[in-house]
Image (cartoon, helix red, strand yellow):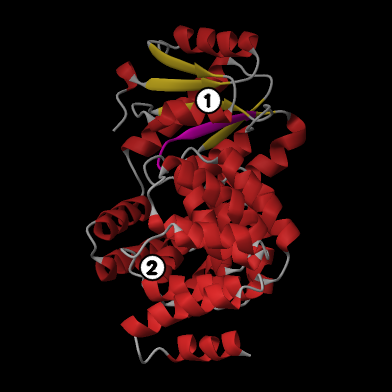
Amino acid sequence: MIDVNNIRILIIDDLDSMRRALYGLLKVMNLGKHCSFAANGVEALRILRKGGIDLVLTDLNMPVMDGVELLASIREELSLRDTPVIIISGEAKREVVAQAAESDLNSYIVKPITAQTLHDRISKLIDAVNHPTTMVEHLRRARSYDEDGKIDLAIREARQAVAANPDSSRPLRELGYLLYKQQDFKEARRFMLQAVNKNELDVFAYHYLGEIYSRLENYETAALFYEKAMAISPRNATRCVSFGQVMLYKGDQESARALFNNALNLTDRPLFCKQELADICVKHDYWDYAVPLLKDLIKDKPGDSDLSFKLGKAYEGLGQHHEAVKCLSGVGEASGEAAEIKLHIARNYLALGWPMHAERVLRALLEQEPDNLEAAELLKTCKE
């Protein structure tokens, strides 16, 4: 419920004069008691994530992150998704905003703004929030069940939400998402496709169609849907990572690099993002991108054997065998991958033309694991 007497409003505009003008209108309407301000979408998200905002009033055209990108980001974050948003636009953008209005946007106002228009839109929005439709009630129950791990009950509520308003894209995409979580990819795809047919700006549905087709190993189609999502909301670090991995599956390292760089620029969790990207790059043998990531991670965790092992393999993949041996030799016997480490060290010694060093490592391994066939085969190579 929104208490109209204590409503907390976030005003977002890159022009200080416009922020002041909107604040002045709100004060006339007795709604200016608790206002916060931001100059763009990035600043706004920082404020929103702290909690306590009842309504977002944002300009459409802003640098860094505009109103549509902010709207998409709000709708993608579980803790923010229900925050009411009003976008203020110029006439030229009205059609684009109207396309988003059905499911993503609570309301929009076309400039110039009047006090009466602002009052009417905010009053209508507060009434809608405080007196939700049957569809919204079902979706709220679905989310509650989902958070409690009761996925079957959540799906039941989502289906009832679709029945309550079959013309809305929102319940379709929510049902698709729940089915995706249940790994029913065929049905999830069906409802997500219906969602984007209802609303061409449903970035959430486009994103999860990318996820679904990626899980089905149809990387060409996955890339198409990620691209559609990126066109609407390009500033999502998670999407950049997922899209980048799809491009690696397609063999397009150049595009993957650009997406990964973008993810690192956008993320608010740089170490986690670097770890995730490093694991993806190691999986796809994308060694030249993996090396600097792993080196940075090792600076933060100098005693991490797993990171050193991965860096050694990355150097090996790049043909930098001296560096590979240095990293792999420093991992130590305590690692759970001791046998594999020795095999990698031996391969690098052989690549350097040092068969005697390789033989010593392999014999030590065979003393511990006499049945290690790979070590036995490599040992034969040392004697050739």
Percent position (x, y) of residue 344?
52, 72
Mark 1 nearby-residue class (10 Å; few <14, some 14–19, many ≥20): some
Side of 123 where 216 appears, left or right = right
- Is 249 located above or below residue 38 in the figure? below
Q: Amino acid at mark 1?
A: Glu
User: What residue appears at the point 57 percent right and 27 percent down from the top-left corner?
Assistant: 58
In the picture shown, does residue 272 fall above or below 111?
Answer: below
Task: Give the labeled residue for mark 2.
Answer: 181
Tally the numbered discs: 2
Q: Residue at x 59, y 33 (%)?
A: 108
Residue drawn at the location 39% of the way across and 78% of the way down: 364
Does label 1 or label 2 sit earlier along the sequence? 1
Q: Nearer the viewer, residue 96 or 255?
A: 255
Residue 148, position in %: x, y? 22, 58
Residue 2 appears in the rendering: yes
Quadrant housing the C terminus: bottom right
Q: Say the numbered circle drawn on residue 348.
A: none
Q: Which residues are magenta?
A: 82-88
Helix or strand or loop: what does disc 2 sit on?
A: helix
* Mark 2 crowd level (few <14, some 14–19, many ≥20, 10 Å Cα): few
Residue 276 lies in the magenta-colored region = no
Q: Place residue 264 in its image quadrant.
A: top right
For badge 2, the amino acid type reads Lys
Marks 1/2: CA distance?
Answer: 31 Å
Question: Percent from the top left, x then y, of residue 346?
Answer: 53, 75
Q: Nearer the viewer, residue 382 or 29?
A: 382
Magenta span contains residue 84: yes
> Can residue 76 be seen in this snapshot?
no
In the picture of the structure, the residue carrying the numbered disc 1 is: 43
The one of 319 and 15 positioned closer to us in this rendering: 319
